[in-house]
Amino acid sequence: MVHILSPEHRVVIAQVAWSHVLLAFDFDGTLAPIVEDRDEAEMRPGTARLFARVCEAYPVAVISGRARDDVAHRLGSARAKYVIGNHGLEPGADMAPYESFVRAAFSELAHALGGVHGVELEDKTYSLAIHYRRSRTRREARRIIHAAIDGMVTPARVVEGKCVVNLVPPGAPDKGVALRRLRTEQGAGVALYVGDDVTDEDVFRLDEPGRLVSIRVGESPASAAPYFLRDQLEMDELLAFLLALRHMSDHATTQE
Ligand SMILES: [Mg+2]
């Protein structure tokens, strides 16, 4: 894994910035820092300003695990061309089966996990999340959650996250599927994707040399992403560099 902002690797960003690229970003832990209370998650004002300008300069997608409306409201004045929620499945053509999935899974889990301190079920309409950030004994909370999932009759895809276990309808499009679809829809030759969590590995694993540049926030030997940012603060530097590159290429075009 290499640091994408190192002087010798910045050229990778320059190459995509000067081509027909779709930029795509996860939200929590990527555009916005992870916070104790997930309802409070937002971009730093500086990030929000840079991100809004990046959305003017490039086609941009935000692909989040949050419900689509939830993440859309957190983008402020930025006009991202695409906003995808629920780990890649929202919006979609036929959402009814996902709603049935959530109803079934939720009632099973509410029964098994009701009253477990610090464990909270979030109904996101088309997928659900079991949060345990507020638990004082996170390891134990996670064990109880997995025991509850093992006891479920409703089949589910389990996606680990940072102090969260996500349950997604089996067979639903994941973030990787969503990104590929958007890139095609946009007619872009290449996509640049930045994410920080297990659900983002569905993009990182696509392994499409020349068509995808994937960057993980935080170096991790277990990740399939070839590039990393050291931490979420470096997102601002990446956004500023992407902007500078587009303005340079605009300038070059004007002078031709
Ligand atoms: Mg994230």
Image (tube, rainbow, N blue to C red):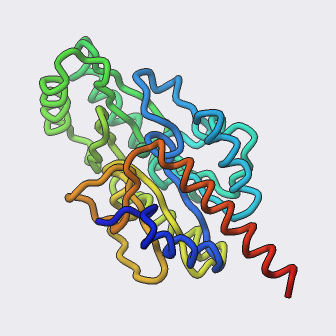
Identify which residue, 216 or 120, lies in the foreground: 216
Residue at x 37% of width, y 72% of height? 206
Q: Is residue 42 above or below residue 99?
A: above
On the image, the x and y values in percent for residue 224 come to 28, 65
Identify which residue, 119 or 247, lies in the foreground: 247
Q: Is residue 138 above or below residue 187?
A: above
User: Residue 147, located in which quarter of the rendered image?
Assistant: top left
On the image, the x and y values in percent for residue 188 come to 62, 77
Identify which residue, 244 or 75, lies in the foreground: 244
- Residue 141 showing in the rendered view: yes
On the image, the x and y values in percent for residue 253 come to 81, 81
Residue at x 57% of width, y 32% of height? 42
Give the quarter the ligand 1 occupies: top left
Q: Residue furthest bottom?
A: 256
Number of disc labels: 0
Taking the image as shown, residue 35 lies to the left or right of residue 118, namely right
User: Residue 186, located in which quarter of the rendered image?
Assistant: bottom right
On the image, the x and y values in percent for residue 84 come to 57, 52
Taking the image as shown, residue 164 lies to the left or right of residue 7, namely left
- Residue 176 showing in the rendered view: no
Quadrant, the C terminus: bottom right
Q: Is residue 137 above or below residue 32?
A: above
User: Residue 231, located in which quarter of the rendered image?
Assistant: top left
Residue at x 51% of width, y 44% of height? 27
Quadrant, the N terminus: bottom left
